[in-house]
Image (spheres, rainbow, N blue to C red):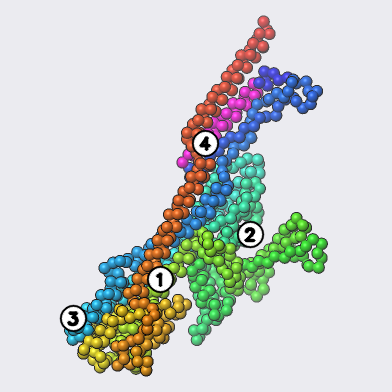
Amino acid sequence: MAGLFDTFTIAKRGLNVQQGAINTTSHNIANANTVGFSRQRAVAETTRPFGGMSRFDTTGAGQVGTGAEITSIQRIRDYFIDYQVRSESGTSGYYTQASNTLSKAEDIFGEPSDTGIQELTNQFFNAFQEVSKSPGKSDVKTVAIKDASALADALNYTYNQLKKTQDDSQSLLQTNVTDVNSYLDQINELNKQIRGISAVGQTPNDLMDKRDNLLDQLSYKFGIKVDRDNLDTINLSSTEYPDASLVNSDPNDTDYSRLSYVKSAVATTDASGNFTGEVTVEYYPLGNENLPTKSFKVTTDPAKAKDLADNLMQNRILIADKDGNAEGLSKTELKINAGDTTTPKPTVGTTTSTVSGVTTITKVTALTNTDGSVVYTTLVKSIPPVTDTELKGGMFQTYKYDSESGVNNVDNNHVRGEIAANQSVQQTIKGYMDSLDRLAAGLAYSVNAIQTGSLDSSASSQGLNNNLIFITNGASSKTDTGITAATIKVNDDLVKDPTLLNCNTTSVSGEGDGKRASAIANLNSMKMNLSNVKSTEDLTKMTRKEFLEEIGIDDASGTGFSDSTCLNLNAGTNGSTVDSYYKTIINNIATTTQEAGRQVDNQEAVLSDLENQKASVSGVSLDEEMTNLIQFQHAYQANAKMISTIDELLDVVINGLKK
């Protein structure tokens, strides 16, 4: 039968339990505003009672309780809400970053504006309309040339600013790489610490909060896949490349991946300028510019070399080993049914071999199914040189599914992360740059064709001493071949001597009836099928004749373009005018930017709701904690009173017996 000393022990245990509960409450209150902190609670259970083990037990009518003890400090966390928050955080990160970049691009165009391309184009055509009215006045021609120069400068500026925005997105990818690697290293280290503490029977709540906080931040970069393992550890990979492990639960398993940043990717050409099918890739290990760059060569189909180099420069990120060394990956699986002896079984383990300078690391793992069959998975890492197929597995492309190689696992309907935004937005900006190139080329070539009376860009076939209005900046001679928005420029000869501007019906002199200037002004209403020029075509190698024929412009007579027919360019009924084509560019960017902004607002609402749900579960409520504190305080006082009472009873028993 329990005695007073047993009751004293129960009261003492009660004090310890309430003290632990008060300590936990104090910890919650202290971290009420700590980012990522999950509230905790002390879990108390009854200790093992006396008696009641059999019906012959003589301790009494039933079991006698021995008090309570704290068995664990529990972290209040809902893993399903965590999954939802991280999933929506990735989507939010994608649209937020895309919206920010697209807004910058929209600001570059700055339309509507008195100094924008649209207004400058109208001024250009209006100036030539004035020249057609007064072809003999030098000051009117001077204004026309200055308006042409202002338009060319605006096209240059807009294109170069878009190119800078594109380059900024690539620079942000390097920042993303260093941030991600830092997060992964911290998570890996916390994983080790958590494993060590859990192994001795304790619960590292605060360390797990730090790890979850890092996972939350990482989810803004790309989609993450978290698999929980024993001893509170996790295995981490990306949803886009689930086979590339980023963090392992086993601290002894160092076969995990990190990201490296591509500095340059150059497709090699031969003496004739043809691609050889070899791409040289130079990269910063782990994205660290302070480390020496490394390089390797990729072999591919010569027809695909340029696209592969461009793709590398757009994506910029390679999946590397833990030290940042880039690697090509390939994976195969072999299933051997139970009792099958005809198929040779692979040797489980890791082997390394080097042949002709190519180092190959092969890792074979085995998984036994419930039916007794065994699936052997072989992962091969090929240290360069590698093939383009192997490289595909090592390229971190997160903005779209790679249907050609099928090595990534991107859901095109649910793209996640800032990295995907920085990769994909470059294509959008490149589309605006290509549209500007077509606009600049269409304008320059058609104006020059009228000015010189020739579709052909060769000097021998052009009139008025080949005095082009627009020329290709940086070319070895004054030509318009390969003209783009980046290189369009007004001929310096016309700037110095505006009388060289041809206004006459013939190209004998710059004087005359002004019909040629009127023809240039009328280009404002001519339709050009600029969309016929594909984005894959290299405009820098196209001639005036090739470009104009592709957009549907030829001579009205059908007998050949000449000085006498240059005033009647024929562009058909398809396409759009220069003004409407530019308005389409502006409308497209405005629509795309508005859509990204709308998605940002939607994601903020969704994410805010999930964060509120998360806070309702894991957040610290000061009102609730203060209520708990009062409850624990009273319980503590009651246990203290119990000890005081037992002390008095013991005094009666012990001292009373003396009397």
**Which residue matches tag 2?**
255
- Give the number of callouts: 4
Residue at position x 80%, y 64% in the image: 340
- Which of marks 2 and 1 precedes in the sequence? 2
44 lies above or below 366? above
Sequence order check: which comes first, mark 1 or mark 3? 3
Residue type marked 1 = Tyr
- Rendered location of residue 7, percent (x, y): 66, 21
Query: Mark 1 to mark 2: distance in Å?
Result: 42 Å
Numbered disc 3: secondary structure: helix
Which of label 1 and label 2 is nearer to you?
1
Q: Distance between the residues labelled 4 and 1?
A: 55 Å
Pointer 3 residue? 139
Q: Toward which corner of the image does residue 278 lie, by quadrant?
A: bottom right
Judging by the rendered image, the residue that carries numbered circle 4 is 27
Which label's residue is closer to the chain start, 4 or 1? 4
Disc 4, disc 1: CB below 8 Å? no
Callout 2–callout 4 Cβ contact below 8 Å: no
Say what amino acid the circle numbered 4 marks: His
Packing grade of label 4 (10 A; few <14, some 14-19, many >=20) is some
Asked whether the viewer can see residue 136, the reply is yes
The residue carrying pointer 3 sits among few (fewer than 14), some (14 to 19) or many (20 or more) residues within 10 Å by Cα, namely: some
Q: Where is residue 392 in the image (x, y as percent from the top left)?
A: 58, 69
- Compare marks 2 and 4 and give the one earlier in the sequence: 4
Q: Give the range drawn in magenta.
A: 8-33
Residue at 53% across / 47% down in the picture?
210
Q: Which residue lies furthest to the front in this view?
A: 573
On the question of residue 484 being in view, the answer is: no
- Left/right of residue 58 with respect to residue 440 in the rendered view: right
Q: Earlier in the sequence, mark 3 or mark 4?
A: 4
